[in-house]
Image: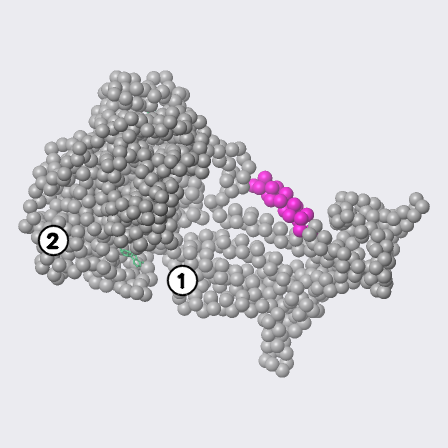
Amino acid sequence: MALFILRRLGVMVLTALCLTFIVFALTNLEPNLEKLAKNQANSRMTDEQVISWLDARGYNDPMLVKYGRWLGVVPHFTREEGGEVVFSRCANPGTSLEDAGSYCGILQGSWGWSTVFQNDVLEILAVRGNATAWLMLFVMMVMVPGALVLGVLAGMREGSKLDRSLSTISIGTTATPEYVSGVLFIAVFASATFGPNWFKGTATSAIDDITFANFTLPVLTIALYGMGYIARMTRASMTEVMTAQYIRTARLKGVSFPQIVLKHALRNALIAPFTVIMLQFPWLLNGVVIVETLFNYKGFGWTLVQAAGNNDIDLLLGVSIISVVVVLVTQLISDIGYVFLNPRIRIA
Amino acid sequence: MTKLADHAGPILEIDALSISFFTRLREIPAVMDFSVTVQPGEAVGLVGESGCGKSTVALGVMQDLGKNGAVVGGSIKFKGRDLGQMSEEELRDIRGNEIAMIYQEPMASLNPAMRIGKQLMEVPILHDGASEAEAYDMALQVVTDVKLPDPKRMLDSYPHQLSGGQQQRIVIAMALMSKPALLILDEPTTALDVTVEAGIVELVKDLGKKYGTSMLFISHNLGLVLETCDRVCVMYSGEAVEDGAIGEVFDNMRHPYTQALFRSIPLPGADKNSRPLVAIPGNFPLPHERPPGCNFGPRCDYFEAGRCDSGVIPMRDAGPGHHSRCVKFDEIDWNAPIAAPAETSKREIGAPVLKVENLKKYYQVAANALFGGGAEKVVKANETLDFEARESETLAIVGESGCGKSTLAKVLMGLETATDGTITMGNADIQSTPIEGRSTKQVADIQMVFQNPFDTLNPSMTVGRQIIRALEVFDYGKSDADRRERMLHLLDLVKLPRAFADRMPRQLSGGQKQRVGIARAFAGDAKIVVADEPVSALDVSVQAAVTDLLMEIQRDQKTTLLFISHDLSIVRYLSDRVMVMYLGHVVELGTTDQVFAPPYHPYTEALLSAVPIADTSVQKKHIVLEGDIPSAMNPPSGCPFQTRCRWKDRVPGGLCEKDVPPVRHLDGGHQVKCHLSDADLAAMEPVIEVGEAPPAAAAQAGVTSM
Ligand SMILES: Nc1ncnc2c1ncn2[C@@H]1O[C@H](COP(=O)(O)OP(=O)(O)OP(=O)(O)O)[C@@H](O)[C@H]1O
Ligand code: SF4
Ligand code: SF4
Ligand SMILES: [Mg+2]
């Protein structure tokens, strides 16, 4: 098992490197850099001025070198004038040139400086990520049990009335994108003009204090969307298991229907959806972006929107690293969980 | 224990039972007017071809016909109580407690994600309110009863960690946990190898006796029914056509279908030249296409228009406890000899066309396929094979699962290349030429007929087109017209109407598809045809026809036939020489007579004894092998058969465990791979002895497998 995890970790690191390189290369393309220069220095710079500005900060070096620096495996760019270091990328505003080390990449924990928020990227990500983690936690708590119960109930008697109504519901929720359901929820549950005003239409206050009123709608919006999909998968898996011969064996042993579902069918039926749930994580990030913007919840997705909108390269890169890691870790968990649930795959 | 009160009468009484399945298109009457009774302690066999409704009867008894099935007539009484009138709760108390069922696929009937122990313990906990500890003790007891090694570890295992035979023992143990009054076995051994099957059958018989359980034994194998049952009921197309005591039905049959069934089975005495099998003409009718009157009418030799096809034919008494559903059974002369078939001359066996020397095929497999890593293991699928095959000869290759039969076929065909040794065909060595590297001639010369006709034909291409494609591959003929002409000839050759050229495979029955497969194999005038279990996927009534066809073409074309099979009766019937394989080794090789008579290799001896024979006059020596076939992944040291051999202690000095025995050459080219001394070999007794046959059975005595 240890060996298996180690191998998977190795593959993971490699994948992470490739993905971040792609993102890094994309954000460091010519037009982006030009925008950056004009943004930071002077929006009326001539083309030559832009080039020299970029040159002076090492932006025009080869992509691989830049990537190495950013990672923290290549010493960072410094400019010397007359043997004296006059510029170091490692020096954030406020630190003196002498204090700045020569390596300052992701590995050293310096994730760069956000131009939008005028703060250290790592710090921003910590705060925002934490906010989103809470959101996700609640989403999972609602979505996973909900979806599994829905799927199992629908799948245990294929074609029954219960199955058909539950299946309709799950198809409905998956077919409704978050921006539609979110707007609908706000209109129905959070406006005085139209129905009950139970919940708040904004989740801004939830950053400091999560309450039932301010968090229910964003959580539901994301959860419902993912729930339908997982429920469908669970249902498919459950109906298949229910027609298996060993279920008939159990029935002909005299096991009662609820016992058959709980003791014989459930574990077998959960093997397939478990993977799906884990793979659902990355998709949730999608919904997070929409919902956080919609409900003005200043989390990870909201940060991503801000960073992208303002060409904040360091922040954008930071966000992508976190996303890549989240995706890869969920994959790993899904693989390990699969092995755990399925006794047929046991590692010697 | 909560059981129904004892009942003086029969355990199970099925009376005029009719069961239908309701599909969107139509009602499918799967079982009609079916009656049978099972007395306490009695074993009743239910035989018939696939689709005749055997399993439906069993599920009807369990009242588990699914959403679309329903009992539409008659009654099923268990210990005098009508199962159809019981509530769901009452039924639950009976299922697994008083009536237990065992079915064909042991792996599929065990929950893959639950430990064996838990699955077993569930029964007493459910029905007797036993505590965990009591249930565990009971489980341990039954697992010991079904003779599984290391019961404690067994209880702790998951189903996939057990072999097929062990799984089936667990399923039997589970059925016996609550000492049921009635045990229903639906083809309990079909998925197993013959030697393993023999062990399971013996176990079921012993346990039945020990616990006094009544049994309903469903099988398509007449021989197996003879070995296990007291009475038998023959089914055809949803109806019982004949029932009675085993001896009565086997020796004094009173229904033409039963007779035809016995005649299509190869006999121990007759051979392919003097008495070919008599195939039942035509095909089995689908439930919604049954003819009026007698279902067997269109295929019956004694059919009489006006009598057989008008009105419902009832079951009638044909002696004490013997019934037949035939209007003419008291007019037919049951002792008439079989219409003498044209005796065909034995063909001359020519020069060797295929020579295999010292052939080895090893597979490298990662110890853990899914996660990679770990030490690589070597599976020795074929170990030093040495044989030759001659022109117009049938060489049978027999052995159980995993013995390397199909690997050999693949290497011969060029689908795999040999690890070592040579294969000489004509005058070229082909052991390391994959099929892409072979010349058109070489490809056309060695062709194959596959086991399953259902997935070797392209479903979206007409039959004629597929044969023409084969001809194109073999570069046959100059023009399309040439090839079309040849294709029509090939259809004639395999006795399919020429109109079939334009049909799609799905419009053909299994036997017809297999004929197309045969036509394709012979398209390029193959010199050697490898037939890998060519009839085992077909119904018994069709098997005989396909086998005969294969023989006939071989006779005309002087083809060398390598006939791969696990079915010794058919092998005995049609082959000139037999090669017995075990775990990749050829353990015995000789003419059919040499192999089927002593001296045997100890494995051949056990194999012969394990084959069920549907003949009341045959006396068989009872040799049941211990345990399962070892995995080819870690074969035993020394002789491959030493883990199960009953002669092992005759060999001094533990030689069997140390050294792989050398090939011994006995008289007349007979080869045996065994350490036994000449004296021991000479002292072996025959396993099968055909005794005095009762008059009617003389014509149909036979080794069976349907
Ligand atoms: N659920 C079902 N729906 C429709 N038809 C069915 C269903 N189950 C069985 N049948 C039909 O009922 C007939 C009897 O089937 P059954 O399974 O009892 O045959 P069998 O004798 O057990 O065959 P085998 O030897 O292949 O097991 C067949 O024609 C089959 O197609
Ligand atoms: S009733 Fe007629 S057709 Fe049917 S089995 Fe008897 S003789 Fe043959
Ligand atoms: S060599 Fe020994 S173990 Fe092998 S078959 Fe002969 S007697 Fe049995
Ligand atoms: Mg069946």
Outermost residue on the front side: it is: B478
Q: Nearest the camera: B473 or B185?
A: B473
Label 2, residues with CA under 10 Å away: few <14, some 14-19, many ≥20: some
- Location of residue A56 in the rendering, given as x and y in whole percent from the top left corner: 86, 52
Q: Which chain is disc 2 placed on?
A: B
Label 1: which secondary element: loop
* Disc 2 residue type (three-letter): Phe
Give coordinates of residue A103: x percent, y percent.
80, 45
Tell whether label 1 touches label 2 (CB within 8 Å): no
Q: Is residue A327 above or below residue B144?
A: below
| Residue at figure coordinates x 5%, y 50% from the top left | B331
Residue A157 is tagged as: 1
Residue at image position (41%, 35%) is B439
Residue B276, visible in the rendered structure: yes
Disc 2, ligand 2: is the CB inside 8 Å?
Answer: yes
Q: CA distance from mark 2 to mark 1?
A: 48 Å
Q: Which residues are magenta?
A: A1-20
Q: Residue furthest bottom?
A: A193
User: At label 1, which amino acid type do we have?
Assistant: Arg
Name the residue tied to disc 2: B303
The image quadrant where one finds the C terminus of chain B is top left
Chain that bears disc 1: A
